[in-house]
Image (cartoon, grey):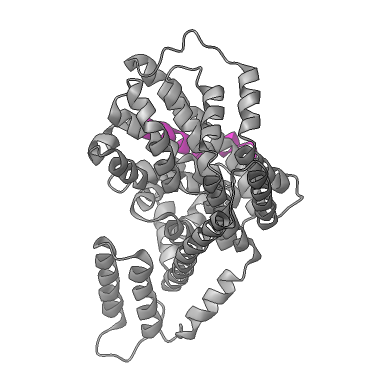
Amino acid sequence: MLPEFVLQSAIPFEIAILLVTALSILLFALGVQLVLAFGLWVVAFHILVPAFPIQNMSITAFSELESFTYIAIPLFILVGDLFRKADVSADIIAFSRACLGWLPGSTGNTVIGTSAVFSAITGSNAATTASVGQALYPSMEEEGYEPSYAAATIAAGGTIGSVLPPSIMLIVYGVTFGVSVPALFIAGVVPGLAMLVILVSINVYLSQKNDYGVDTDEYSFDGRDVLETTWRAKIGLGAIVILLGGIFAGIFTPAESASVAVLYVLVTAIATGRLRSLGEIVRAGYTSLVLLGVLMPIIVIAVLVQQNLSFLGLQGAVSGAVLSLGSRWLIIVALVAIVLIAGLALASIPNVVLTAPLLTPAALEIGLDPVTWGVIFILGDAIGFITPPYGLNLYIISGLTEIDYMVVAYKVLPFLVGLLALLFLLISFPWLNFLA
């Protein structure tokens, strides 16, 4: 039931807000930028509702963005940009091949391992899918992988970075809902590694079944090769160790850890000749500022929408509807279904800020703590990147390889089923994530 307020207008409030909502949804469906489509709804709501004066928008923006933890986001992005400018991709690929390439489906496993490292550093599924696709798709084709399967493997590998720390989405979730970011990072380790193991296992099975890739029977795990490639990949891997080690040890906050990682990448890349000019560093910083300028308005608009929906009582209505199912297993199915639907329809940040509050009361009611629920929600959001009809990673790799979107979507189904099984396991038996 709507709150007790009446706007003196020719159009009743309920009709006016429905018309604005319909217009915003239509604009979103037509491809208008999300911040503009949702921003229209926010502005209209503040005009229509006396309890929300227009000044609330600027007040909310300031109070939301003054959080010190948000400083970590541009620094994480800068680490990823410096990582790319230093051109250490070949070192990470060699490291991943040494660790996983001796298994059947050698290059497919290398793709998944490389994607995990890339996406953990850059914090971007899209950038990881594009980068790994450009680097390794030709090799997969040469080694006899079916092109659509190779594309699907790359798209699936790009999902890992949303959950495996350090993750920008875990930072956004933690700051927005007042949950400890270090605790979320620790809780993301087991699910992130589980995603890696599941995707590699599926690739090994399918590669053996379909005779994909080079013959690895004559190869075995070589610890010396792993150590050598680890040393060569010291810039990228060292950044991860600093980012996670400092946070887990309680030495740094996420923002401080990211600052130290930026300094580490700069020093090592310059010392090894990977970065040779000030211009390269400036361009990396410029890219970070541009991405920050895209992310921050989306976060503010999404928070404002969440405030307005809360005022309308939608959060209580959705949680009440889910809890009314009675059975714990039906509630779990409903939570997973809503998370997946929202994940495939919305970009990650709006999905986190808008959808998570609607479901959190129901999640807590069935025994999930805020940290565990946060990681589960981000996992569901990541699965949306390879779930039709949206599936951002599928669109990116389809455009890169010029393979029909639906063909790639069909080939990604085994990976999708594996990740869905992990999602159900974690939400049904949260104790499996023993670090949470």
Query: What secondary structure characterizes most of the magenta part?
Result: helix
Image coords of residue 264 (percent x, y): 68, 48
Asked if the stretch drawn in magenta spans residue 433, the answer is yes
Q: Is residue 109 above or below residue 22?
A: above
- Visible in this render: residue 425? no
Image coords of residue 409 (percent x, y): 29, 37
Residue for point 46% across, 32% down: 112
Q: Quadrant of the C terminus?
A: top right
Position of residue 171 in the picture relative to residue 23 (left or right): right
Q: Quadrant of the N terminus?
A: bottom left
Position of residue 317 in the picture relative to residue 365 (left or right): left
Image coords of residue 32 (percent x, y): 29, 66
Residue for point 51% across, 37% down: 89
Q: Residue furthest top?
A: 218
- Visible in this render: residue 102? yes
Identify which residue, 29 or 17, lies in the foreground: 29
Residue for point 39% across, 43% down: 130
Asked if the stretch drawn in magenta spans residue 192, the answer is no
Q: Write down the region rendered in magenta.
A: 414-436
Image coords of residue 420 (percent x, y): 41, 36
